[in-house]
Amino acid sequence: MGGLRTSGQRRVFRRLFEPAAGAWLGRRARLAAALVAAVLLAGCTGLAVAVAGGGGDQPDTPTRVLILGDSVAVQTAGDYTWRYRLAQHLNLTAPGRADFVGDRIDVWDNVANAPGSNDYVDAWFDRDHHAVWGASIRDERDAIANVLRATPADVLIVSLGANDLTYWSAPQTAVDDMIALINNARLLNPDIDVVVSQVLDRSRYDGGRDLQQQATAYNTLLDQQVGRWQTERSRVVVARGYADWDPYRYTWDGSHPNPAGDFVIARAVANGLAQLGIGADFGPLYGDFPWPYSGGAVTATSQPGRNVLTWPATPGATEYLVEQRVLSRGEQVFQRLPGTLTGTPGTNTWTTDPLPAGTITEYRVIPVKGNMTGKPGPPGRATTR
């Protein structure tokens, strides 16, 4: 299938790569579009059969999966997200069988402190969800009927509870609100199946665990009571597998998953879906994964006695490290300057300390997101006037 793309093919690619300005409005990045795009990129129809697993026994319509969550499910700019890792897993083990649905496609912009960012590491996946920063079980308990009226679903993945246990609810109250949420969802769809995620522990920067006691109590009650929540038409399973969860290892700020944490959460949810007959078990995890970003290209402008550096923001970067080498002194290796610079949206700017006229210096920046450090970006050079 060579030559120019047809108008219909171009629409598929625009749908995947050009989200609407209001990132939380409407459904985007359908799995079906991703499959068609894969065929178009490959330039052959044979791949369609391979991706769809041979096709004959596949359902006519995919299962609609709605992710209902809080900040751990939304995640932040500069993340892959566990939703991305789950989508990859389902594309491999249940091709064409799962369609994420929802009224949002965004991640939270943790630098601007606002919703609506599309700065995923990789946006090539089905990004639809209904996860809201700060959401709780008690809020979604009463809102779920309207959510499902607007976006019908066959399976509900509920990733909530940390905010309830932190601010409002005792563990048993949170569990009671969870079954009320599920029953309210059944009013709209008596056949809906539900995967309930356990609540993850959090850490404090001064050491210790922030939510361990409450989360453990809630998760224990969930396991004890979930068997009574089943109906003949609607199943409920718990996404487990967090026994080895370490917030110091698997988060970038004590609460929100880093690239390694994404896999831990995706594994638990995928194994829950497998109990419902959607996809296979996730399998073992292999090591940690680095944050993939590098700093932006530095523009260094000479001023009388100083240099001014500017560089574009790295998605999600909360701080920057600055490194320099003074070429007029014969330095070959970049030296890291002390301290960090606070990250800002858009263009970042920093002015150097006083320098003698004629000093030739190269600078580069390294993005930092919480406890994750990226790689140096392209350097910029200036000769101080």
Image (cartoon, helix red, strand yellow):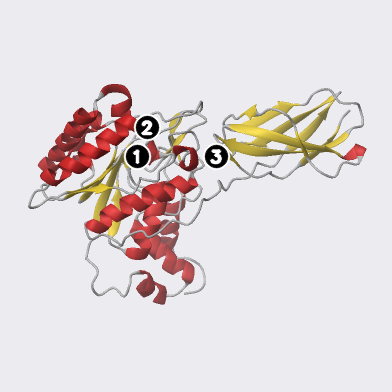
Spatial CA span between label 3 and label 2:
18 Å
How far from the left and from the top, in percent, is residue 36? 39, 64
Which one is earlier in the sequence, the residue at label 3 or at label 1?
1
**Residue nearer the viewer, 126 or 178:** 178
Mark 3 neighbour density, 10 Å: few (under 14) some (14–19) many (20 or more): many
Q: Amino acid at mark 1?
A: Leu
Q: Which residue is mark 3?
A: 315
Q: Label 2 belongs to which residue?
A: 133
Report, in whole angstroms, how far the alpha carbon at label 2 lies from the one at label 1: 16 Å
Which numbered marker is on residue 25? 1
Q: CA distance from mark 3 to mark 1?
A: 21 Å
At 34% from the left and 47% from the top, the residue drawn is 128
Pointer 3 with pointer 1, Cβ within 8 A = no
Q: Residues within 10 Å of mark 2 (few under 14, many from 20)?
A: some
Please tell me in which quadrant of the rendered image residue 143 appears.
top left
Residue 126 shows up from this direction: no
Name which of mark 2 and mark 1 comes first in the sequence: 1
Q: What's the amino acid at mark 2?
A: Trp
Judge left or right: residue 95 versus residue 193. Answer: right
Q: Residue at x 54, y 34 (%)?
A: 370
Q: Which mark is residue 64?
A: none
